[in-house]
Image: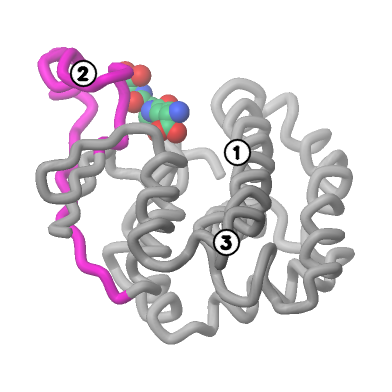
Amino acid sequence: GPYTITYFGVRGRCGAMRIMMADQGQEWKEILMDFADWTKGDLKASCVFGQLPKFEDGGLVLYQSNAILRHLGRNHDAYGKDGKEAARIDMMCDGVEDLRLKYGKMIYQEYDTGKDQYIKDLPNHLDKFEAVMAKNKTGFLVGDKPSFADYSLFEVLLNHLVLCSSCLDTSPSLKSFVEKMSARPKIKAFLGSDAYKKLPINGNGKQ
Ligand SMILES: N[C@@H](CCC(=O)N[C@@H](CS(=O)(=O)O)C(=O)NCC(=O)O)C(=O)O
């Protein structure tokens, strides 16, 4: 710390890191970028990849939402107990990223024509995470405590429950995972906060 997020007024690619920091008892500053200012280009030109989110940890400046999650994982004992667990957590985080990319493509490019088919195909994607969650038996993807991959999976599942409220009905381990994560006191408080509720999930208002 001190942690600062610079991003647009959406949950988007900062949904998971906010939930993770809340659960870890961390505070952070939010610099909310409005899109008109962004299109002027000054801040964009200063971003390593020309994109947000930008994350500051004191003097350290990071971009790439999954790199930010990993940094928080390292700093808050949420990256496994050893190298093997860390590698499996990386694998699961990358798997969640694949789901995020599919979800984002549907939301931003194919919502009207592709939403129904996306929901039909969803079980084929969620069953991979269901199998890992069911096998690990601790209530987390890897090891016996939440890792940054758990926070990313949890957040992306919350978004999918908005898209399709029944999408976990055939995934009992994922359903229990979402219920348990939602019940963690600091997460429950954050999900109930105006700061969380006032932000739309995506930049185009579709969900
Ligand atoms: N891989 C990056 C993607 C970041 C990204 O796509 N940022 C978008 C906003 S959002 O899709 O995350 O909401 C952006 O800056 N868009 C503005 C621009 O590209 O000029 C990450 O994970 O952080």
Of all residues, the one furthest to the front in this rendering is: 83
Check contact, mark 2 vs mark 3: CB within 8 A: no
Q: Residues within 10 Å of mark 2 (few under 14, many from 20)?
A: some
Q: Which residue is mark 2?
A: 44
Q: Quadrant of residue 76?
A: bottom left
Coordinates of residue 165 in the picture (x, y in percent): 71, 62
Residue at the location (39% across, 73% down)?
A: 23
Q: Where's ligand 1: which quadrant?
A: top left
How far apart are the alpha carbons under marks 2 and 3?
A: 37 Å
Q: Is residue 41 magenta?
A: yes
Which labelled disc corresponds to residue 73? none
Inspect this view and state whether residue 162 appears. Answer: no
Given residues 10 and 90, the one toward you in this image is 90
Check contact, mark 1 vs mark 2: CB within 8 A: no
Residue at the location (53% across, 63% down)?
A: 147
Q: Quadrant of the C terminus?
A: top right
Coordinates of residue 163 in the picture (x, y in percent): 65, 50
Dot 2 beta carbon under 8 Å from ligand 1: yes
Which labelled disc corresponds to residue 82? 3
How far apart are the alpha carbons under marks 1 and 3?
A: 22 Å
Q: Quadrant of residue 142?
A: bottom right
Query: Residue type at mark 3?
Result: Asp
Residue at the location (74% across, 71% down)?
A: 175
Residue at the location (43% across, 67% down)?
A: 77
Which labelled disc corresponds to residue 97? 1
The first of marks 2 and 3 along the sequence is: 2
Query: Residue type at mark 2?
Result: Lys
180 up-or-down from 56: above or below:
below
180 up-or-down from 131: above or below:
below
